[in-house]
Image: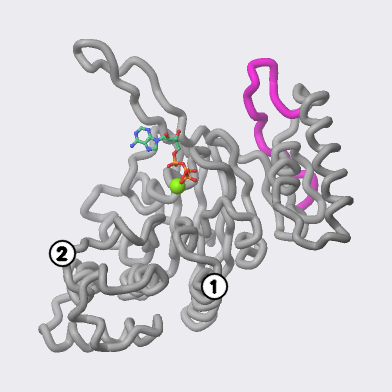
C-alpha cells in the first residue's frame, strides 16, 4: 500500500485580462510532478520562491483543485472523491501554514483556534473540548492558561506552536509543513524543528516538509525532491542529494549555501565557480530546445534526475 502518491499532478492558475476578464493565459504553478511518501518518513520539497511548493501542498489537502493528475492516500484516490467524502480524509491530513502571523485569526482566542478542527469532526461538550485543547497545548509546550489568550499575546515561536497544535488536534497521519519555521529567528527555529522531530516519533507522523532552506531540509528530511518552475528536477535520499547532486539546478542550489567554515570556504568558492560555468556551457544538457525541464529518470533505485 502506498501511503501518499502524487501522480502526474498539474495545477494551473488562470490569468484573466481584458475588458471581459476572460482567461487569457495560465500560470503553470505545478506542471506534471510525481512522487510518493512512505509512512513515517519526512520528504522534503525544496526550491526557490514561486516554484510551486505551496500549491502542491494545498492541492494535497484539497484547498486547490488539480488541473490534471491523481492523488492517492492509503490507496484511495482523493482527487476522485466528492467534497463530502473528502472531508473524512481531511482529518488525517493537516497543514501547518507558511505564515504564523496571518494564518491565525487575531480575533479568536487560542481555545477557539485550536478547537475549530475538532468542532468540525467531533461533538464534544465545552468541558471535554477545553480539556482536549489544554492537552495538545501541553504537547507543544504551551501552558494550559494560554487557551484564553489571543494570537498577538504570543511570540513568533509560540504562535508557530499554536499552528502545530491546531494541526495535531485530530491525530493526523500526514502533516504538510509549509515553511514551518521560516518566519522565526534562528534560535527558535531549532527549538520548533526538534519539537517536530519529537512528535513525529511519538505519533508516527509523516511529514511533507516544504522549505527553501537547504540547511533545514538536511536536518529534517530522509528523502528530498528538488522543484524548479513547477517540475521536479531531482529526487533522492538526503545523502544522494547533498553528496552526489546530478542536476545543474540542484548543484546551483547547493552551491548557494553560504559556507561558514573558513577552511572549506575556498573549496566552496571553487565549486560555485565550476557550477556557474557548467550552467552557462551545458544548459542544453539539462533543458530541452524550448527550455523545458525533462521528465525524471531513475539513475539508481532511490535517485532520479531530469535528464534527456
Ligand atoms: N491563487 C493564485 N493565483 C494565480 N497564481 C498563483 C496563485 N497562487 C500561486 N500562484 C503562482 O503560482 C506559482 C507557484 O506559487 P507557490 O505559492 O506554489 O510557490 P512556492 O514555491 O510556495 O513559493 P514560496 O517559496 O515563495 O512560498 C507562482 O508563480 C505564483 O505566482
Ligand atoms: Mg510557498
Q: Earlier in the sequence, mark 2 or mark 1?
A: 2
SS at mark 2?
loop
Farthest residue to the front: give it: 262
Q: Residue at x 29, y 20 (%)?
A: 16
Q: Residue at x 38, y 18 (%)?
A: 25
Ligand 1 is within 8 Å of the C-beta of the residue at disc 1: no
287 part of magenta stretch: yes
* Residue 115 as seen in the image, left or right of residue 190: left
Category of crowding for the residue at label 1, using alpha-carbon neighbours closer than 10 angstroms: few (below 14), some (14–19), many (at least 20)? few
Tally the numbered discs.
2
Colouring scheme applied when the structure was drawn = one colour
Residue 103, by quadrant, is: bottom left
Relative to 94, is 270 above or below?
Answer: above
Magenta region, residue range: 286-301
Q: Nearer the viewer, residue 180 or 81?
A: 180
Farthest residue to the left: give it: 125
The secondary structure making up most of the magenta span is loop
Q: Residue at x 59, y 55 (%)?
A: 213
Q: Looking at the picture, how far across and down is residue 26, in whole percent?
A: 40, 23
SS at mark 1?
helix
Question: Does the rendering let one see residue 121?
Answer: no
Q: Between marks 2 and 1, how big is the CA–CA gap?
A: 28 Å
Q: Residue at x 71, y 58 (%)?
A: 237
Relative to 239, is 147 above or below?
Answer: below
According to the picture, the residue beneath numbered tag 2 turns out to be: 107
Question: Does the rendering let one see residue 222?
Answer: yes
According to the picture, the residue beneath numbered tag 1 turns out to be: 187
Q: Nearer the viewer, mark 2 or mark 1?
A: 1
Q: Looking at the picture, how far across and down is residue 112, in whole percent?
A: 18, 72
Amino acid at each position: 500500500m502506498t501511503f501518499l502518491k502524487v501522480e502526474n499532478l498539474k495545477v494551473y492558475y488562470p490569468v484573466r485580462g481584458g475588458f471581459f476578464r476572460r482567461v487569457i493565459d495560465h500560470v503553470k504553478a505545478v506542471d506534471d510532478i510525481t512522487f510518493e511518501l512512505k509512512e513515517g518518513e519526512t520528504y522534503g520539497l525544496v526550491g526557490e520562491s514561486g516554484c510551486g511548493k505551496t500549491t502542491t501542498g494545498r492541492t494535497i489537502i484539497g484547498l486547490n483543485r488539480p488541473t490534471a493528475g491523481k492523488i492517492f492516500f492509503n490507496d484511495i484516490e482523493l482527487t476522485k472523491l466528492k467534497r463530502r467524502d473528502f472531508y473524512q480524509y481531511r482529518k488525517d491530513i493537516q497543514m501547518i501554514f507558511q505564515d504564523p502571523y496571518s494564518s491565525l485569526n487575531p480575533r479568536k482566542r487560542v481555545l477557539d483556534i485550536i478547537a475549530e478542527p475538532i468542532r468540525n469532526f467531533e461533538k464534544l461538550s465545552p468541558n471535554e473540548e477545553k480539556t482536549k485543547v489544554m492537552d495538545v497545548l501541553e504537547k507543544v509546550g504551551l501552558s494550559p492558561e494560554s487557551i484564553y489568550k489571543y494570537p498577538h499575546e504570543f511570540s513568533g515561536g509560540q504562535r508557530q506552536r499554536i499552528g502545530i497544535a491546531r494541526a495535531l488536534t485530530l491525530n493526523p497521519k500526514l502533516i504538510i509543513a509549509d515553511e514551518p519555521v521560516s518566519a522565526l529567528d534562528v534560535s527558535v527555529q531549532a527549538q520548533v524543528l526538534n519539537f517536530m522531530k519529537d512528535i513525529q516519533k511519538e505519533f508516527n507522523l509523516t511529514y511533507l516538509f516544504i522549505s527553501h532552506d537547504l540547511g533545514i531540509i538536511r536536518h529534517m528530511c530522509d528523502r528530498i525532491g528538488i522543484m524548479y518552475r513547477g517540475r521536479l528536477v531531482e529526487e533522492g535520499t538526503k545523502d544522494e542529494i547533498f553528496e552526489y547532486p546530478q542536476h545543474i539546478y540542484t548543484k546551483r542550489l547547493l552551491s548557494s549555501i553560504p559556507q561558514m567554515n573558513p577552511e572549506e570556504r575556498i573549496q566552496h568558492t571553487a565549486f560555485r565557480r565550476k557550477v556557474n560555468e557548467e550552467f552557462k556551457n551545458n544548459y542544453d544538457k539539462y533543458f530541452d530546445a524550448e527550455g523545458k525541464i525533462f521528465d525524471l529518470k531513475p539513475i539508481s533505485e532511490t535517485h532520479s534526475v531530469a535528464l534527456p
